[in-house]
């Protein structure tokens, strides 16, 4: 047995005097083991808290990166949509030009035939 000085006699097993008490050595060992376990658990809680803070910061950073990427994607989508509209307008313009080319070729061929016919008629009239 080990005798310790304790201020409260209610905590001791046997009251020898107001300033001393007797506690079994196994109880002291168990108390020291519990104290060490408490200190270790307190340190683990601190490490866990720090890890959670880091993970939270990382997730917030990743969320902001995802939001930024979504904004970039939306901007690129609008650019693509605008370019597709420009392409459609240019395609319509090209089809109009191709139609005009066909019309002008027909008119040219008709004018060649007409001028050739007039030339032949004038030759026949002159002869």
Image: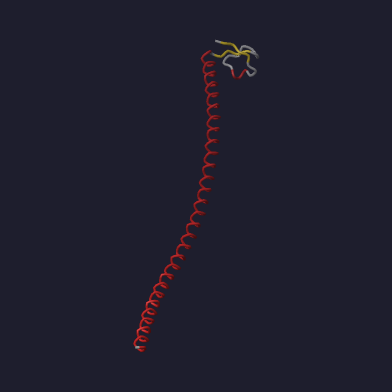
For this view, does 117 lie left or right of residue 31? left
Q: How many marks?
A: 0
- Tell me how the rendering is colored: secondary structure
Q: Nearer the viewer, residue 63 or 4?
A: 63
Q: Nearer the viewer, residue 124 or 58?
A: 124
Q: Nearer the viewer, residue 95 or 106?
A: 106
| Residue 27 x/y as whole percent | 53, 16
Q: Quadrant of the N terminus?
A: top right
In the rendered view, tell whether residue 70 sits above or below residue 89. Answer: above
In the rendered view, tell whether residue 11 sits above or below residue 94. Answer: above
Q: Quadrant of the C terminus?
A: bottom left
For this view, does 124 lie left or right of residue 32? left
In the rendered view, tell whether residue 49 sits above or below residue 36. Answer: below
| Residue 37 x/y as whole percent | 52, 23
Quadrant of res 15: top right
Quadrant of res 120: bottom left
Q: Residue at x 54, y 16 (%)?
A: 28
Q: Residue at x 52, y 16 (%)?
A: 29
Q: Residue at x 52, y 37 (%)?
A: 55
| Residue 33 x/y as whole percent | 52, 19
In the rendered view, tell whether residue 102 sits above or below residue 127. Answer: above
Q: Nearer the viewer, residue 62 or 111?
A: 111
| Residue 20 x/y as whole percent | 63, 13
């Amino acid at each position: 047995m080990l005798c310790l000085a304790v201020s409260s006699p209610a905590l001791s097993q046997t009251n020898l005097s107001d300033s001393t008490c007797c506690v079994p050595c196994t109880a002291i060992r168990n108390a020291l083991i519990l104290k060490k376990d408490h200190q270790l658990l307190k340190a683990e809680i601190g490490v866990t808290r720090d890890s959670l803070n880091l993970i939270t910061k990382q997730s917030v950073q990743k969320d902001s990166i995802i939001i930024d990427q979504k904004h970039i994607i939306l901007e690129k989508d609008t650019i693509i949509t605008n370019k597709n509209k420009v392409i459609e307008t240019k395609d319509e313009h090209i089809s109009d030009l191709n139609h005009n080319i066909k019309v002008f070729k027909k008119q040219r061929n008709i004018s060649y035939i007409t001028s050739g016919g007039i030339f032949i008629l004038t030759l026949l009239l002159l002869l």
